[in-house]
Amino acid sequence: MSGQKRTITRSEHALEDLDGAALSYAARFADQAESRRRDLREELVQLALPFAGRLARRYRGRGEPLEDLEQVARLGLVKAVDRYDPDRGSFTAYAAVTITGEIKRHFRDRTWGVHVPRRLQDLTIEVSQATAVLTSELSRSPTVAELAERLDTSEEDILAALESAAGYTPASLNGPVGDDGPAELGDMFGALDADLESVDDRLTVSGLLYRLPARERRILAMRFYGNYTQSDIAAEFGISQMHVSRLLSRTLTWLRQAMLTDAPPRWESGIAQPEPTDAALTVSVRRVDGRTEIGLTGELDREAAERVRAGLIDAVRDAGTDAEVLVDLDGVGFVDAAGIAALLASHEAARRASVRLRFVRPQPYVRRSLTVAGLAPLFAVA
C-alpha cells in the first residue's frame, strides 16, 4: 500500500486548501495593519463561501427559500472566521459547527408562524423524529403513550408538542375554503351578536318601563316604536312640543340612572305639578257565589309584598276547605322577586289548606314573570 499513490478528490483538496488558508490567515493576521487585516479576512471569507453554500443546501426543501438559508450560512461563516483559533483544531470543522448552528437557530427563531417556547420547539422536532422511527418499527402510527415512553417524558408534554407543531405554518385566514369556492377561511368565523349582548339590557328596561307613569310609557312607545315625531305626540296629548321634549328627556334620564343602580330611584314627575303615579298597591276583597275574589292594583314590589302575602294567606284561611280563591292581576303592572315570593307563599298556604288558588287576567309582563317562577299552572280564565 505504501507504494500506491492516493488520489485526492476535488472536495478533499478544497477542504485541505481551506484549512491551509485559515492557518495562513491566522499566522499573518496579528502582524498586519488594520486595513490589511480587513483584506485578509475578506479573502478567507470569499474562499470559504462555496463551503457555506454546500452546508446551506442540506436544509433546502424545509419551507425556507434557499437564498435565505445561504445568507444565514454566510453570516455563520463570518462569525467562524472572526472567532477562529488555530490552537483548537481544524477550521473547517469549527466553521461547519458554527454555520450549522446558525442555520438551526434561524429555523428555531425565524420560521415559526406563531411564537412557541424553545423547549416545545425542540420537543416538537424530537417527537417528529420519534414518530418516523416508531412508524417504521411498528408498521403503524405510534400512540401518545408510546411516544412518551420512547422520549422519556410525560404524555402531557407530547400532546403539547403535537399541538405546537401546528404553529410552525399556521393556516392563513385568507386561504380559500374548498377547491373552487370563493369563500375564505376567515369568513367561517362567527362574529359578536349585538342582539344577544343586549338581552340583559332589554330585560332590565322592560321591567323599568312598568315603573313609569302610563303617560310616559305611552310617549316612549309612540316616539321609539311608533316613529311619531314630537309634534305628533304633542298633538295627541294636547300639550306643547317643548313639553314633550322635556318629558322625553326626564324619562330617559331616569331610565339611565335606574339601569346603573341596584335600587331604581323613585320616579319624580315634577315639582310644579306632581303627577299621580300608580306605584302604590291597593287590595280589594269580595265574595261572589261562594268564592273569594281578590283584586290587586298597582305594583307588586318589595314594599307591598309582605302586605299582599299576609292578605292572601288570611283570605285562604277564611275561605275554608275546598273553596276557591281568585286573584285578579289585571291592575298589576309590575311584579318583582319579592312580589313573586309573596304569591308563591300564598300558593303554598292554599295547597296545605286544600284551597283552589287561581290567578286571572295577568298583564303580559306579569304573566311572563310568573311563568318563569313556575306559577303558570295556576292561571285561569276569569
Image: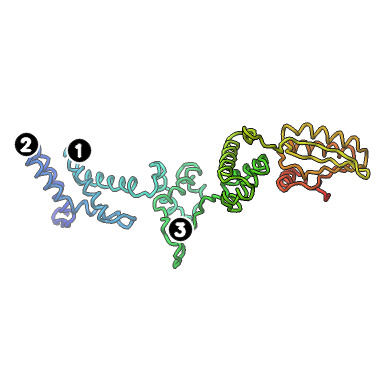
Q: Position of residue 82 (x, y in %)?
A: 17, 40
Which residue does the image show at 93% across and 43% down from the upper left? Answer: 290
* Between 97 and 192, the one nearer to me in the picture: 192
Badge 3 or badge 2: first in the primary sequence:
2
Q: Disc 1 designates what residue?
A: 88
Q: Quadrant of the N terminus?
A: bottom left
Colour treatment of the image = rainbow
Could you say whether the residue bearing mark 3 is in a helix, strand or loop?
A: helix
Quarter of the rendering containing residue 356: top right
Could you say whether the residue bearing mark 1 is in a helix, strand or loop?
A: helix
Q: Nearer the viewer, mark 1 or mark 2?
A: 2
Which label is found at residue 185? 3
Q: Position of residue 60 (x, y in %)?
A: 30, 56
Residue 328 in view: yes
Q: Disc 2 designates what residue?
A: 31
How far apart are the two marked residues, 1 and 3, measured between alpha carbons? 55 Å
Type of amino acid under label 3: Leu
Residue 125 higher or lower than 306, as above or below: below
Label 1 environment density (alpha carbons within 10 Å; few <14, some 14–19, many ≥20):
few
Which residue does the image show at 49% across and 42% down from the upper left? Answer: 154
Badge 1 or badge 2: first in the primary sequence:
2
Badge 1 or badge 3: first in the primary sequence:
1
How far apart are the two marked residues, 1 and 2, measured between alpha carbons? 20 Å
Q: Nearer the viewer, mark 1 or mark 3?
A: 3
How far apart are the two marked residues, 3 and 2, measured between alpha carbons? 64 Å
Is 344 displayed left or right of 356 in the figure?
left
* Between 58 and 87, the one nearer to me in the picture: 58
Is 238 displayed left or right of 357 in the figure?
left
